[in-house]
Structure formats: structure tokens, C-alpha cells
Amino acid sequence: ILNLTGALKTVVSGGDTKVMLQELLELLVKKVPTTYCRMWRYHPETESLEFVADSRSRDIGEQAPAQSTMALDRVHWHRQAVITGRVMVINQRETRTQMDEDEESLALIAGTRSALIIPLMSGSRTIGVISLAELRCWERNNFSLSETLFSRALANIIAQVLANPLNSEETQTLRRQVSVMQQRNIAGELFAELPMRLSTPLTSIMARTDQLMNSVAVKDEAASVHLLAIKRQTEKIVTEVR
């Protein structure tokens, strides 16, 4: 409880997102304790996981570099965690909880004996996954109930940190959409008011043109031609406005 409270204080204090995530992952591998952990961001539009960060409690020797992205259909247990929103417990000595070599090489580290795969939830959405990998055999070190509950609780805190940039991006998108809608609304109101705003000056032009045709045009043939053209064009505009 003290560790979780400390993690919450770290989040509330703010700061750089990457630094906070790294600190929280270091706390996770230290307090469970486990050999290694890796965090992924879930992209539903491409059905893939994107590498975010990792941490280790001790030297794990030469390992293949983490995949930057991996398709969800290639990692069965990670996919199950994403879809169900439940923690997956892997024990390589039990047939029903084994992870195949392909998923191990893509998502974890070589020599993994057991693992916890924890979904990162924001509301009802899965936004990522944390994979905890243990190199020691299950009999020597397994994930107890208290360690699993602690891992899930800390994962919930980590999920909120991971979700903040997503929420920020969504907020900016919504603001842009609202701005466009407001602009369209203003244009719509202007368009609706346009006939009323144009009718008065057009009526005035028509009336004054008639007055000039009855006075000036009678004496000036050229003026009569121009005034008649003005009247006809004005009548066209009035028709369009109506």
C-alpha cells in the first residue's frame, strides 16, 4: 500500500511522461520482484502492440533488442489479455499455460520460465499491456496472489500515465472539430441572414433607378440605356436572393 501510494504521488506531482513510466516500471520489477518487464501500447486500428519502455532488476545477459511493433495475432497470450482485460499467468512447465517460442522471442526475453501479462485499462478500453518475465523456475520463484494484485494495481496507475497523452491528443482533435463546427455554424447563420440583409439595399437601388429613368432618362438616351441595364441586373440579383 505504501508503494502504491508513493506511485500515486509520483503521478500527481507531474513531470515528463517517459520519466514517470520508467520510474514506475523500475518500482514494479523491484517490488514484485521479477527479472524483467516490458510495456506496450495497443493500437486497435492496426491490431498491433508498440514498444514503450522496459526495465530489469538484474543483468539478463545478451538479449535480442525489443521489437518496436508486433502484430497482435502473433502473440496469443498478449492478445488474450488485450481482448479479455484479464491478467494472464504463464508457467512454462504447465502445458495449458505455456507460451510458444515465437511469442517469447517477440514479446519477452529468451529463457523465460514464467510470466504475467497485465492489460493496461483506461475506463473500459485496453490501451496497452505490461509483460513481466521471470527467468527463475516456477518452484523457486512464482507469482503469488499478493504479487499479482500489486502488479495489477500498479499497472492501473501506469495506465493513467499512459492514457494522459492519448487523452490530450483526443482533446486537441475534439477542439479542432468544435472549431470547424462553430465556423460552419457562423457561415450557416450568415447565409440564412443574407437575403434579409440584401433585400433592403436592392429595393433601394430598384426604386432610385426607376426615379432616374422617369426623370433623367427621358432627356438623355444614353443614360436611359445604362439605367435600364442597371435595373435588369438588379432584378436578376433580387431573383437569386429570393
Image (cartoon, grey):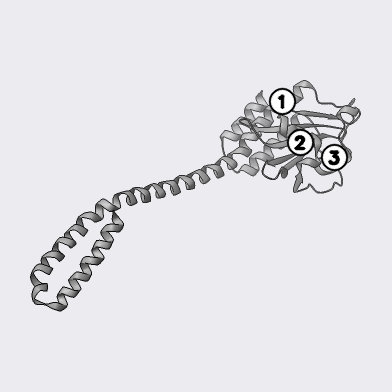
- Location of the N terminus by quadrant is top right
Residue 26's quadrant in the figure? top right
Query: Residue 38: x percent and y percent?
Result: 75, 39
- Tell me residue 118's x, y (percent): 73, 31
Residue at the outermost top position:
145
- The residue tagged 2 is 79
* Amino acid on which disc 3 is placed: Glu
Q: Earlier in the sequence, mark 1 or mark 3?
A: 3
Residue occupying image coordinates x 25% and y 56%: 198
Q: Amino acid at mark 2?
A: Arg
| Residue type indicated by callout 1 | Phe
Quick one: 56 or 98, which is closer to the camera? 98
Task: Name the residue tied to disc 1.
Answer: 150
How far across and down, in percent of the image, does residue 188 sit? 37, 49
Q: Nearer the viewer, residue 197 or 176?
A: 197
Query: In this figure, which residue is indicated by the disc labeled 3?
Result: 104
Give the numbered dot on residue 92: none
Q: Position of residue 89 (x, y in %)?
A: 81, 28
Gap in angstroms between the C-alphas marked 1 and 3: 24 Å
